[in-house]
């Protein structure tokens, strides 16, 4: 500002000087042209440098003024821009504040969201718990309802059976009434019948005594010592001296009529590993496997000459027979020794021959000729063992139940039949 004032003062001074110079020139040199010329030259010579100087100064000043103006312009421009910046800054601060506010709102929103989520989680877990409880309750309800159903069914059954029983009772009580009436008529009939019966009893007694006398004479004469008179395949009594009456299984199918079956293996589960006393007496069932008993065989075959017929079924299904025309066994004291007579039959080899004149052996009565062991014990059966056998029809089912031919024939069924020799001739 002071510079501006100085400039203005300087300008004023320069202007004053200039006016003075020119004014003098006009007053002094106006009348005289000559003088004027001289004056002019003189003035010019003195003032010129000063004027130049002032001109220079004025130019400079003008230049400065221009610059000053420009500067002012620029500074006002700057001011404007400064204000604008300030405005922008203020706006910016305002917006930042707004942004902060938004941020806070956002944070609050996030917190709220987290809270909400937590509540949702809590709610979910509670719901799960409640669902489990519901499922449990449902299961219990189902169980109880099935129990209830069962109960109902039982109740219905009981009720219906009760009802049935009531009906029955009604029916029965009706029947009782009916029956008591019936009974009376029946009693009358009974009385009649009784008198009839008494009469009949007397008749029967008479008849029975007649039958008994007949039976006695019949028994004495007709009960046979062999199956020959029966001629069928049933169980019948025999009367054999030394034993008396006993039942035998007859066979009239395998080899003609009238055979006594003394031994049978048809796949039963009878134990053939028996002691001496049992083999002596006999064992098993006529319906399945059995051995008739050594004493009976001895007694029967002692009465008269007997033949033996052996029927065999091999494991592969082939059937064979072997016949001996003079079969008997000795008494117990001589060991039920075996006699056979002549062999014939469809089987290739006479394997029984090996046991001819051999005593019977059981595990508790060893009469075999084996040097080292007890054949009956070893082969778990009683038989006419020597050292030990070529055939054993009492052996355990399996490879030991066999008949020695050119090869061993393993047997699944065996029967030994006897009948009096003269029966064939008749
Ligand atoms: C019991 O059974 C009888 C006969 O079937 C029926 O009439 C009655 O209504 C039943 N009672 C019930 C309680 O079911
Ligand atoms: C009584 O008994 C008789 C003979 O058994 C029979 O025919 C009749 O139907 C019965 N009556 C009743 C009501 O049971
Ligand atoms: C005949 O006598 C025998 C032996 O005493 C007896 O077992 C049988 O039952 C009698 N038969 C009849 C028909 O009385
Ligand atoms: C049975 O046989 C014997 C002799 O073998 C005989 O004495 C007896 O009379 C026969 N009959 C009866 C019923 O014993
Ligand atoms: C059973 O085997 C014997 C030889 O061991 C044989 O001769 C026979 O033909 C066979 N039978 C059958 C039905 O296969
Ligand atoms: C058979 O053997 C037994 C002993 O093992 C013996 O007591 C019995 O006398 C013998 N029998 C004969 C006839 O030799």
Image (tube, grey):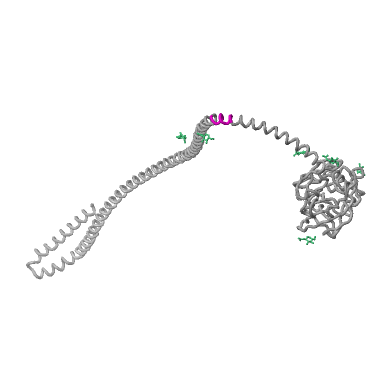
Query: 74 and 69: which one is in front?
Result: 74
Q: Does residue 152 show up?
A: yes
* Residue at (86, 43) in percent of width and height: 295
Q: Which of the 4 quarters of the picture holds residue 212?
A: top right
Residue 271 placement (x, y as % from top left): 79, 45
Q: Is residue 159 above or below residue 395?
A: above
Query: 125 and 270: which one is in front?
Result: 270
Residue 143 placement (x, y as % from top left): 50, 38
Q: Quadrant of the C terminus?
A: bottom right
In the picture, measured across the screen, residue 112 lies left or right of residue 334, that is left
In the picture, measured across the screen, residue 407 lies left or right of residue 159, that is right
Q: How many marks?
A: 0
Query: 274 and 24: which one is in front?
Result: 274
Q: Which of the 4 quarters of the picture holds residue 116?
A: top left
Q: Is residue 170 above or below residue 67?
A: above
Residue 184 placement (x, y as % from top left): 56, 29
Figure quadrant, ligand 6: top right
* Residue at (92, 49) in percent of width and height: 369
Q: Magenta region, mostly helix, strand or loop?
A: helix
Q: Does residue 140 show up?
A: no
* Residue at (54, 29) in percent of width and height: 180
What's the magenta region? 181-188
Query: 264 and 385: which one is in front?
Result: 264
Residue 182 placement (x, y as % from top left): 55, 31
């Amino acid at each position: 500002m002071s510079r501006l004032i100085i400039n203005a003062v300087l300008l004023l001074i320069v202007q004053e000087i200039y006016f003075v110079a020119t004014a003098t020139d006009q007053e002094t040199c106006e009348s005289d042209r000559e003088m004027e010329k001289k004056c002019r030259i003189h003035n010019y010579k003195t003032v010129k440098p000063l004027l130049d100087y002032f001109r220079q100064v004025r130019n400079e000043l003008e230049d400065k003024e221009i610059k000053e103006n420009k500067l002012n312009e620029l500074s006002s421009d700057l001011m404007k821009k400064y204000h604008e910046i300030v405005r922008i800054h203020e706006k910016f601060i305002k917006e930042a504040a707004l942004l902060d506010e938004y941020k806070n709102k956002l944070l609050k929103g996030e917190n709220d969201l987290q809270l909400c989520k937590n509540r949702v989680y809590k709610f979910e877990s509670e719901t799960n718990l409640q669902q489990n409880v519901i499922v449990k309750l449902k299961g219990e309800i189902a169980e109880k309802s099935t129990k209830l159903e069962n109960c109902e069914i039982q109740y219905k059954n009981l009720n219906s059976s009760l009802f049935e029983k009531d009906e029955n009772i009604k029916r029965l009580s009706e029947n009782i009434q009916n029956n008591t009436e019936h009974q009376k008529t029946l009693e009358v009939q009974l009385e009649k019948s009784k008198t009839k019966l008494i009469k009949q009893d007397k008749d029967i007694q008479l008849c029975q005594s007649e039958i008994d006398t007949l039976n006695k004479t019949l028994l004495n004469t007709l009960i046979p010592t062999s199956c020959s008179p029966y001629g069928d395949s049933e169980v019948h009594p025999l009367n054999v001296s030394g034993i008396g009456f006993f039942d035998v299984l007859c066979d009239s199918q395998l080899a003609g009529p009238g055979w006594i079956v003394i031994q049978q293996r048809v796949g039963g589960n009878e134990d053939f590993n028996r002691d001496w006393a049992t083999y002596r007496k006999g064992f098993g069932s006529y319906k399945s496997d059995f051995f008739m008993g050594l004493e009976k065989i001895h007694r029967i075959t002692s009465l008269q000459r007997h033949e033996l017929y052996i029927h065999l079924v091999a494991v592969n299904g082939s059937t064979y027979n072997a016949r001996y025309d003079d079969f008997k066994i000795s008494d117990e004291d001589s060991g039920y020794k075996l006699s056979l007579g002549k062999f014939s039959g469809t089987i290739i080899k006479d394997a029984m021959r090996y046991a001819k004149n051999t005593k019977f052996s059981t595990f508790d009565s060893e009469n075999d000729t084996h040097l080292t062991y007890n054949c009956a014990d070893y082969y778990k059966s009683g038989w006419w063992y020597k050292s030990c056998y070529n055939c054993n029809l009492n052996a355990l089912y399996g490879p030991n139940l066999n008949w020695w031919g050119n090869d061993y024939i393993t047997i699944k069924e065996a029967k030994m039949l006897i009948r009096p020799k003269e029966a064939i001739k008749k």
